Image (cartoon, rainbow, N blue to C red):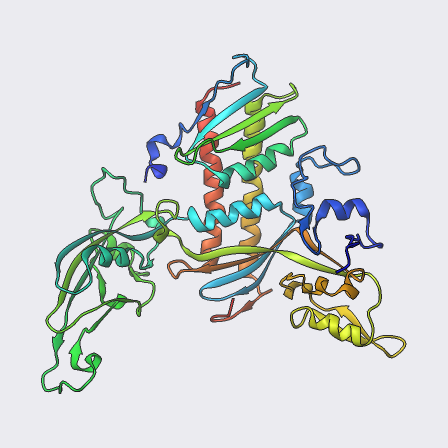
Amino acid sequence: MADNYQYQIPPNVDREEFMRTRVFVERDQVTNTTSNDLSGTWNSFDDRWDFDAWKQQFRLVINRMSLNAVEFDLIGVHASVANTLRRILIAEVPTMAIEDVFIKNNTSVMMDEVLAHRLGLIPLRADVHKFGERGPNDAPTDLNTIVLNLKVKCERIQGTPKSMPREQRLTNHTVYSRDIIWDPQGDQATEHRDNPIQPAFDDIVITKLNQGEELDIVMHARKGIGRDHAKYSPVGTASYRIMPEIHILRPIVGDAAHKFASSFPAGVIEIVKNARGQDEAKVADARKDTVSRNVLRHSEFLDAVTLSRKRDHFIFNVETVGSVMPAPLMVQAFDVLKQKCLLLRASLDNLNLQ
Amino acid sequence: MSAMDQDIQENRISLVPIDGEHADDNTCCTFAIQHEDHTMGGILRYIIGKNPDVLFCGYNLPHPAEDVMHFRIQTNGKITAADAFRKGLDDIVEMTEHMSAEFSKQAHGTGFQYVPSYDL
């Protein structure tokens, strides 16, 4: 193991800009991670907040979107902005979830509280904007509560032999989320006519029943945020990674090029023929790199490559739980951040300082 | 639930008296903000720190059992600490509105691949 390993800033880049804008990924550690953005840190660079200058270099690029997830790039923001957005997605975007479970009859093997816990975790598809918050002392109204019913009895289908498996012998052997029926209260039937309230997925297994067992449950769903209980979180998870970069410092040719390419995940490094007809390694797509630093295990490449990450380029991956589609969810997340700031502004004004 | 209670929403900031600090010195201030944590603390620290008239800004959460964040701002005298705070909040709102507009614009555009589902 070479002990004279030294992180080399690539020679063809501006040193101060590299130090200001990159995280150094070294063989045994990751350095240059601390925040250096406070105004006045850099001699040659004016760091003060300038919205127009920021707006010029800010980019948001959506990469892929599906029914349940979105992958997008946030370029030109600080890590604290990306982190705040991530935290809001996980914990502060409101959704509806079952909060009160009134069990009229439960003769199944599953205990009441376990069943109630499971029901709370079922994601509900409901337009959150049409509902208000319900405090602990507020009465349930059609504007703050959704009433759902679950009434299922497991019975024997006449004439089926005992040798058949239970699923075929009994009705309602498995209780699915599709068995939860919305009971519209007050104006809810007309308000939600276009988007009827129901669990986000039909096939979530709630519990299993045997012959003669039944469930008769009334549930009240409320608006809440992930901070209070994880059942309200609209995302399976929301995470980001920081854009990796690979700088090749000297030509890597021949067999070494193939070994170099195999040290990275597939698609990161490509082999091209150089002017002299040799195989040479070139960076194809650094985005696919998982930054395992595997290449730095090989002593022959320690001086050949510099790994870094671009501090202001975040690759977000947001996977929703089913209650909200990803595009409206992101818009809501930005809105939550804006509302938090406006509320703090109001609080500050109430303080009556000069 | 109490975090969403409308009654206390607009009275969430109070001042923390620090020993040795003059009561009428409005260039240094520690704000105690209820029901906030790193979510707002991080972004506020960044934006307020970008203000060249702010000499010091930082936040901490004094105790995990209390839902309170302390945010301290010290300025060079040209503006008051409260003004720096206000400007920071306005800057965040401006930035967020732009990001949101950009996202909506992109989401309605065709620059990306829409698939029914994909492996993450």
Residue B85 in the image: above or below residue A97 = above
Numbered label tally = 0
Q: Residue drawn 77% across and 52% down?
A: A7
Asked whether, in this view, residue A190 is left or right of residue B79, the answer is left
Say which quarter of the image contains residue B35.
top left
Residue A260 in the image: above or below residue B75 = below
Say which quarter of the image contains residue A268.
bottom right
Residue B91 in the image: above or below residue A76 = above
Rendered location of residue A309, percent (x, y): 68, 54
Seen from the viewer's position, the closer of residues B84 and A52 is B84
Seen from the viewer's position, the closer of residues A71 and A252 is A252
The quadrant the N terminus of chain B occupies is: top left
Seen from the viewer's position, the closer of residues B60 and A133 is B60
Q: Residue drawn 22% across and 45% down?
A: A141
Asked whether, in this view, residue B30 is left or right of residue A207, the answer is right
The residue lying furthest to the right in this view is: A276
Rendered location of residue B95, percent (x, y): 58, 42
Rendered location of residue A148, percent (x, y): 22, 57
Q: Residue drawn 49% across and 41% down?
A: B39
Residue A342 in the image: above or below residue A77 = above
Rendered location of residue A94, percent (x, y): 38, 48
Q: Residue drawn 36% across and 51% down?
A: A232
